Image (tube, rainbow, N blue to C red):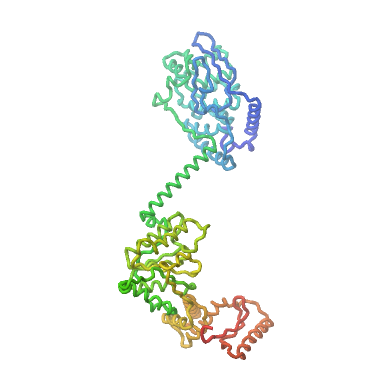
Amino acid sequence: MRGQLHAGQLRRRDFSKLREAHLERLSRQQQRHQQKRPFINVSLGGLTGAGAGPARFASSALLTPTSLHGVNFVGGANGFVSANALGAGALRTTARPFLTSALTSRLHDLRLKQLERNANHNPSNPSAQYDFLSELTHRYPEAVVERFESFPDLAVDERCALLYFGALQRTNGQGRFNLAQFVRRMNAGGGTVHPVKMQALTDLLENKEGGKKLTKSQSATAAMQIVAGAGPAVAAGAAGSAAASAVGLGGAGLGLSGGVRGADPRYPLHVQMHSPNSGRAALFTLARHVLVAFVVVSALTAVLDEKGMGRAMGMNGKHVQEAEGSDVRFDDVKGVSEAKAELEEIVMYLRDPGRFTRLGGKLPRGLLLTGPPGTGKTLLAKAIAGEAGVPFFFSSGSQFEEVYVGLGAKRVRELFEAAKKKAPAIIFIDEIDAVGGTRKLKDQSALKMTLNELLVQLDGFEENNGIIVIGATNFAESLDSALLRPGRFDKHVAVPLPDVGGRKEILEMYAAKTKLASDVDLSVLARGTTGFSGADLYNLMNQAALKASVDGLGAITMGVFEYAKDKILMGAERKSAVITAKSARCTAFHEAGHALVATLTEGAMPIHKATIMPRGQSLGMVTQLPEGDQ
């Protein structure tokens, strides 16, 4: 196909022929806007049959360059084609879309390329040609005319011909219309045009060549009427009246009343639905679809979560752990002797509730464990459940709230309902300040709903007999006052950092699980770890075990413990630091001064170690070993 205008060449800035055609079309559009010409009817004079005289086409003006895509022409009794008969589709002028952008233009070019490839690969398929031409005619009517006239080996049908006539009108090309070439083009269409219409076009050509003076514009209009479907004329042609079918106008209407496509299975009626061209309408349609999809997905998610199927499908995490027995005992909790003593009465109540209720007394419903991180609050709650032998329900304050409003309150109800079925039981809520913080006016309503539901479950109309709620927090002062009042979390147990005796107990418990050298003194190690929590002491023991393993030692020595403690307190050794001899000497004098003053001062703590090994931000340090928790 030499000279083919394929979709990849449809950018007017790259090809002079299309650029000139585009500029010419813009010029014509500006002239039309300036003249403000109204829509002008096309007057088609009555056409007689063969031997009745020459046909007369009185055309006051051509149709305005509007889209003829998919239009059925219906003629009046006097042979007029009015604006109403053409339909709203013919009056729709080219408008700038609402969402025009470089992206949409690029997508349009890609679609053109895809349609052209499909049309070129299927030259005998008129539907493929029609799909390409219908998309091409919106922006490049000149290319439609060029492709229709230049490539006779491509199959075409009536739809393609109508697009061709529409492109002719948009480019004002009726004056160069060649009826003979058009008839040959339709004959070469692969037999897809109805034979009655082809006979009518052939008769029109013979009458024109026989002496009937028709201009090219009038020939184009007459051929367009025949292709669009002249029912009575086609019917007359099928009956053998060559005169009536010669012009395609039997003096009656031009509609499809006689029926051409759709009347015979060999010639099906092609129907194509067209969405509105308006970008605003497309935007509203998209918004409506997105809204409907959001509502459907939200409703489906809520139903699945309500039925308990959401977690099975992996839609949300496990926010409430199932009831489980705890194997932790109070003997496993070290360093918090006072807190364990306060919790003994809770264990006694869970073991024998009747002992407390016979005199009308009620044990506190809520127990709040407060203290720094790593002191064993969660371990104490498990120890209570293990000592009492009751089910243990664990949840975190951050697990209640998720995406949907009201989900937190629903999960609080689920937690208490599950505990009631297993009563007596313990509900442990870790980091309760995430859901029970002080309420403010600017807080989200969902967070308030969750806290309100928790307050109702703790002390509402329904009694939660046999259920102990234990909360743990590092910031008791941030909790809402309604949560701390008597009847809810009315018993507060402080879990402080362990003292020197508690630290020694914790170290002995961890030391029983490893192998220590004979030079290790845990009492000295406990005195030197002031401010360490149980979690910090576990980290100290773990770091020492790792260091001993790296050094290839058979047991953990005291030196390894000192190394691990200094690494936790001061940071790793900076052995690669470039320190001059003068700087090291000054540092040694400085640290020696600290040691000398501590030695000569009465009542000062004894010196444990002095070093000028840089660690972290320090060039050296002198550590003193207190006798207790000073």
Vertically, is 105 above or below 154? below
Q: Residue at x 49, y 15 (%)?
A: 77
Residue farthest along the front direction in this orientation? 359
Front position in the image: 541 or 533: 533
Q: Residue at x 32, y 66 (%)?
A: 423
Quadrant hosting residue 263: top left
Q: Is residue 544 left or right of residue 469?
A: right
Residue 627 x/y as whole percent: 52, 87
Vertically, is 346 above or below 154? below
Front position in the image: 10 or 248: 248
The answer to whether one can see residue 520 in this image is no
Residue farthest along the right direction in this orientation? 582
Quadrant hosting residue 136: top right
Quadrant hosting residue 236: top left
Residue 221 x/y as whole percent: 54, 20
Q: Is residue 78 left or right of residue 340?
A: right
Vertically, is 292 above or below 134? below
Residue 589 x/y as whole percent: 66, 85
